[in-house]
Amino acid sequence: MILKKPRIGVFKYSCCAGCEFQLIYFQKYILETLGAADIIYCQMLQSDGIEEGPFDIALIEGAITETWQADQLKKVRKASTHLIAIGTCAVCGGIPAIKNNQNELEVETRVYPDTSALHSIKAHPVEHYVKVDGSVKGCPMGERDLTELVLSLLLKKNPDFLESSVCVECKLKGNICLLVAYNEPCMGPVTNAGCDALCPSYNRACFSCFGPLKDANSAALAAQLLKMGQSPEDIFRRFTEFGQPTIEFQTGANVKK
């Protein structure tokens, strides 16, 4: 019996395209997985494609920062059985959401002398506009979670994502705690795992590119950072660099007020 291959669409909005590069790069790890599907739309892979679907799985990269993106995203949602946000920008706003802390026109005029042709809006994650069926965190997205998600969808089972902090990954690797031992402003206690503690393993404090851990105690970490001599402005930047729109990180960022 010949099984029908799932149809996958990949859409990119405001971001660096690093997650799509990561998707292509990861093919050496998940080649068999992607070989079991038909990628019918992905502008980075092919010049043509079937933009209107239908899709069994739609992978969405990037934050929504323009009205046409929101309109297209809604059409993709209607044409898709499963819609998945991939990467920190799509999941929680990411780097593009830094601009949300300032007046929109002020941000535009920093880059463009003439703003008459611009129609940008505040940066929001995909879930702000449509229902999502899953998320793959990371900047770029993590290999483990991507493989787990695609396999789970193909096998019609619930994915098993990590729901612990980066601190747990540090402990498993035997790393010395940069926050406690070296007074480094590490965001590991409030950041979702998935990176295998990449930065702390090289003696660099976590800067939270995987976004907030669910129910993260951001207020406690912000208080600790204050005790360590970090200024309210520095703490605000740490909690808004990758997760400005999230409730979890807004608590920590409020130390500036």
Image: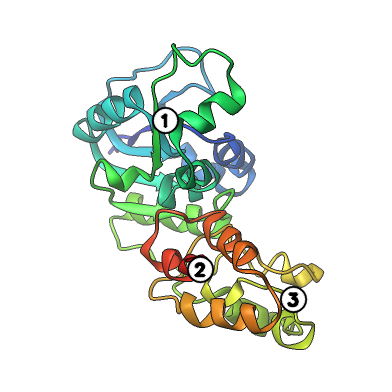
Q: Nearer the viewer, mark 3 or mark 2?
A: 3
Q: Is 31 drawn above or below residue 232 in the view shown?
A: above
Give the percent coordinates (x, y) of residue 14.
48, 32
Residue 63 falls left or right of residue 193: left
Give the percent coordinates (x, y) of residue 130.
24, 42
Judged from the image, the secondary structure of the residue bearing numbered disc 3 is loop
- The residue lying at 31 percent from left, 63 percent from top is 158
Q: Amino acid at mark 1?
A: Phe
Q: Earlier in the sequence, mark 3 or mark 1?
A: 1
Residue beneath disc 2: 192
- The residue lying at 49 percent from left, 52 percent from top is 146
Residue 253 falls left or right of residue 121: right
- CA gap, disc 3 to disc 2? 18 Å
Judged from the image, the secondary structure of the residue bearing numbered disc 1 is strand
Q: Earlier in the sequence, mark 1 or mark 2?
A: 1
Residue beneath disc 1: 11
**Based on the displayed image, in which of its 4 quarters is residue 144 positioned?**
bottom right
Q: Amino acid at mark 3?
A: Glu
